[in-house]
Each structure stands twice: as C-alpha cells, then as structure tokens.
Image (cartoon, helix red, strand yellow):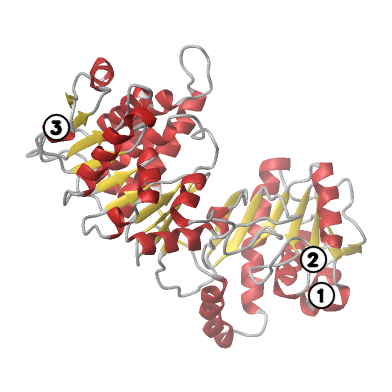
Amino acid sequence: MRHYYSADEIRDAEAPLLASLPDGALMRRAAYGLATEIIRELTDRTGGVAGHRVCAVVGSGDNGGDALWAATFLRRRGASARAVLLNPERTHPKALAAFTRAGGRIVEKVPAATDLVIDGVVGISGSGPLRPRAAEVFAAVDDAGIPVVAVDIPSGIDVATGAITGPAVHAALTVTFGGLKPVHALADCGRVVLVDIGLDLPGTDLLGLAASDVAARWPVPGPNDDKYTQGVTGVLAGSSTYPGAAVLCTGAAVAATSGMVRYAGSAHAEVLSHWPEVIASTTPAAAGRVQAWVVGPGLGTSDEEAAGAAALWFALETDLPVLVDADGLTMVAAHPELVVNRRAPTVLTPHAGEFARLAGAPPGHDRVSACRKLADTFGATVLLKGNVTVIADPDGPVYLSPAGQSWAATAGSGDVLSGMIGALLASGLAPAEAAAAAAFVHARAAGLSAVDPGPGGAPTSASRILHHIRAALAAL
C-alpha cells in the first residue's frame, strides 16, 4: 500500500531526526540517495558518470542544498559539475562550499552541452509556478531536450494538489525522501523514486493501491464457492438509444469475477447476444436476487426517463450496495435525498462535468478536497474520474489511482469501469477498495489494449478495454 504524506507530516517526522543527528547529516544522507539515483539515470542514458556533464539549478534553502551536495558527489565520481544559483545570497552555504571545493563551477545558465539537469529550485515548502528567472532557465532546458531530475518534487507543481498554474519543471525522474507526497500521484513527475532517510512515519488516510494490494483483494473462487457465493451483480443500464452501455457494463461485470450477472432493462436482447451467460429480464423486479446493483449507464433519453428513474429508485430503495453512474448521476443531482438518506453503501462515479452537477461547482485544482467534501455531503463513496482517479470514502480514506496514460479516455470506458466496480461490490469488497481496485485494473486493461489493438488497428476502445480485463488481472 502506498501512503502519501503532507509537507507538514514530513517536517514533523524530520524534526526528531534532525535533533538527534549532527548538523547537516540528514541533508547529506538525502543528497547521497539523490546522487545514487542520478548515477543510475546517467548510466542508463549515457553509459556512465565520468566525463559527463551535470548542472544543478539551485534555489534557496535545503532543496538547493540537496542539489548542490548531490552535484558534489557526482563531481567526486568524475562528472563535470556546474550550478546555476537563482538566489546567490540565500544559497545553502555549506553545500556551496563543498561544491566549489570539489571543483564545481558556478555559471549563469545551463550549458547547451549538459547531459542532465538537477532541479533544486524549491522543495515541499514551495508554492505557485516557477518565478521568472527559473522559468527562463527551464524553458531553455526544455528547448534543448535535456533530461531533468527533480529533487523531492518538480518545481512549480503544487505539492498537495498537483496543480500546475504556470511554468513548471518537466521531470524525467523525481527523487523524493522519507515518504511520497500527493503530487507524486496527482501530477506528472516522471519516474518517482523514494529514498529512505530514516523517517518514522505513521499511516495516513491518503492511499494508493499497488499491484500486490489489488491482487490480494480481487475475489478468487475457493474450493467451496459456487456461482451464488461469489457475488451476483445486478445491472440496470442501457436503453433503445444506448444499448451499447448495457453490453459494456454487463460484459465488464462478467469479466471481473466468476460469479453471476443479472441484467434488467430494454437492451436485454443485445446483452444476451453478446453475453449468453447473463440472466436477462426486462424489469428490475423480475431480475431475481442480487448482491449489488449497477445503475445508470445509458439509461435514458427523454422518451425513456420514466423507466430510467424507476430503475434508479428501485435500486436505491434496496438495502444493497448500489453504484450510480452516468444518467443515474444526473437524476441524483436533481434528487440528492435519494442517496443522502441511504444507509446501504452507495458509490457515485462522476466525471468532472457530472461532479459539477452533483456538487454545484467543478472540482477545481484541489480534486482530493473536493472529492472528500462531496463524499461527506452525500454519505457515499465518490470516484472522480480522470487521468488520476480520486476515490473518497465519507469520513474515511482517499485512494489515488494514477493511470499513467490516457488510453481509458474513450467513449464507453466509464460503462466498463462501472460494471467492474459493481462486480467487486457484489463479491463483498468494501466500496472504496472496490472502486480503487477496479480503477487500477481498468487503467492496466486500457494500457494493454493500446499495445494490442486487435482487428482494424484501432489503438483502443471500450470494447477492447473490456476484453483485456482478464489479461490485466493475470499480470498483477
């Protein structure tokens, strides 16, 4: 399980360690870890360290000190080391002295022939975009195509929200210390490496699942299981206008677990033509017993709103876990009391536009806080879709699920995700864990579909994502 820590939590954990160590020892420990990772990066890119050229862009305070100490260690390994001092009068004095004694040189700009740049402008205490001088330096670095290693966070990106509101560093690698920060999941930090510097950090309520966590939670049939004990998923989706939503949502539920899927709605013929193993009926009342409902994808045009609303009302009046998506969310936005007053688990899965209808405003830059607030308001688990999916439990943890790519941003992809989450809810998984695990596998399936496009050569589609769910699970 990944834990993400605020800047204050990291500083609080550093305080006793700083008090127990000689002055500067913790900085040199961090810088040595940073230099070790830079050596690996340089070796991968250039074949070695000796004779290659690095340049540190140095801000004030400890972050600049880390960069200068790392450049000093690299200089001692035979690299040519340069440094651009953005605030010379506030540069860390001991680190600067060590750097110059080792033969490092101070320059006004990053030399064009540099092999790697170290971003030591601001650390976890920084805020806002790059200042003009730093922005000018890194614009030239970008133009020259020089790879950047960021110290702790890429400068110019908000550590808590991942927001980029102006010029910011584009890092190929970010080396962070002690614990991961929210920015490492919420923004593009390149490859992220965590260096252990000996901090004693408690658990947090801002989490991320790793592949091993998902594998441990995903339901696998045991020797005494049957189709009923593994969870029966009910799907209320699709319409004559959007039958594909029913096909995708139901098919994803079939692919996600080995239990049973029951479908109810006007697209029952289309569903059965694709998934003959599904038990299909025309009305929710005739569907039979289920352990969770998925309701909303493709439910209604204006001619079918009454049937869609009836399906939503039917599901929400049960004492079962219910996932609400798409058209169902539009109805919930108009009748929030349907969810607010529920005692059974409810999962809402909006994209940004649907979120705005539910919350009365878009999520904005701070998607974690916005998601927490909406979850608390509705008393429901909220999954906010995006390149980084945010899942908040009411009065509980928040899970961050970075996709790492945007292949899942395709029509019908959300219907697939809803079916997957519904199947996990039916199996008995807790709502936030079901949503986080499904989001993780969904992103992996989207990535697999992009490299295995199948007939026609299309890079990906919701149908292709669905057909790669099992492969994504097998790769955990």
Mark 1 residue crowding within 10 angstroms, few (<14) / some (14–19) / many (20+):
many
Tell which residue pokes out farthest to the left in this image. Answer: 224
Residue 115, position in %: x, y? 79, 47
Measured in 3D between alpha carbons, the distance from the residue under mark 2 to the one under mark 3, in whole angstroms, is 65 Å
Q: Which mark is residue 287?
A: 3
Q: Earlier in the sequence, mark 2 or mark 3?
A: 2
Q: Quadrant of the N terminus?
A: bottom left
Instruction: Specify the amino acid type for callout 1.
Output: Thr
Q: Secondary structure at mark 1?
A: loop
Q: Marks 2 and 3: which is nearer the front? A: 3
The residue beneath circle 1 is: 91
- Judged from the image, the secondary structure of the residue bearing numbered disc 3 is loop
- The number of callouts visible is 3
Circle 2/circle 1 CB separation < 8 Å: yes
The amino acid type, in three-letter code, at marker 2 is Val
Q: Is residue 325 visible?
A: yes
Q: Position of residue 36 (x, y in %)?
A: 64, 58
Q: Which residue is mark 2?
A: 58
Q: Residue at x 39, y 53 (%)?
A: 382
Q: SS at mark 2?
A: strand
CA gap between label 1 and label 3 equals 70 Å
Instruction: Please name the amino acid that badge 3 sits on.
Output: Ala
Instruction: Please indicate whether residue 387 sits to the left or right of residue 26 in the image.
Output: left
Query: Residue shown at 66%/42% (left/top)?
Result: 44
Taking the view exactly as shown, the residue that stands out farthest to the right is 108
- Give the answer, above or below, for where 430 lies relative to 181: above
Disc with the residue nearer the chain's start (1 vs 3): 1
Looking at the image, which is closer to me, 341 or 450? 341
Foreground residue among 342 and 420? 342
Kindly indicate whether the residue at mark 3 contacts the one at mark 2 (C-beta within 8 angstroms). no
Instruction: Quarter of the image for the C terminus: give it.
Output: top left
Local crowd at mark 2 within 10 Å, few (<14), some, or many (≥20)?
many
